[in-house]
Image (cartoon, rainbow, N blue to C red):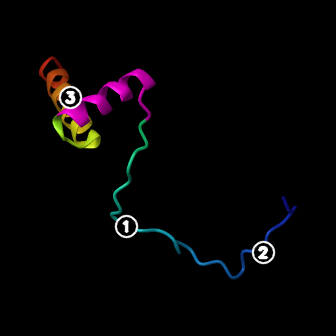
Amino acid sequence: MKREYDFSKAERGKFYKGGADLRLPIYLETKLQNQLERLSRKTGKDVGDMVNELVKKEVELIEEFL
């Protein structure tokens, strides 16, 4: 790493994208991921769609008790 950097030609916010949707990388335990992949093949549903449905239901249950 250099001791000093020249930012005189830098442009503030050059890569900023207002309102951009950020996707969270979520890592599942291996056993759970394998189970979801197996269910996905059996049902023909996308794994991501299945996870979203499950998480939505779980969040609804948690919110009921808060």
Which residue corresponds to mark 3?
59
Of labels 2 and 3, the one closer to you: 3
Which residue lies at the image location 20% right of the left edge and 28% below the top edge? 59
Q: Which residues are magenta?
A: 27-42
Residue sitting farthest toward the front = 42
Q: Residue 24 falls in which quadrant of the image? A: top left
Q: Nearer the viewer, residue 57 or 45?
A: 45
Of labels 3 and 1, the one closer to you: 3
Q: Secondary structure at mark 2?
A: loop
Compared to residue 30, the image places residue 65 above or below, namely: above
The reply to whether the C-beta atoms of the residues labelled 2 and 3 are less than 8 Å apart is no
Residue 40 magenta-drawn? yes
Q: Is residue 8 left or right of residue 31?
A: right
Which residue lies at the image location 72% right of the left edge and 80% below the top edge? 8
Quadrant holding the C terminus = top left
The location of residue 45, given as percent across then percent down, is 19, 41
Label 1 Cα neighbours within 10 Å, binned few <14 / some 14-19 / many ≥20: few
Q: Secondary structure at mark 3?
A: helix
Report the amino acid beneath label 3.
Val
Q: Nearer the viewer, residue 4 or 44?
A: 44
| Cα–Cα gap, marks 2 and 3 | 48 Å
Quadrant holding the N terminus = bottom right
Which residue lies at the image location 69% right of the left edge and 82% below the top edge? 9
Which residue corresponds to mark 2?
6
Which residue corresponds to mark 1?
18
Report the amino acid beneath label 2.
Asp
Mark 2 and mark 1 lie on one chain; the one further toward the N terminus is 2
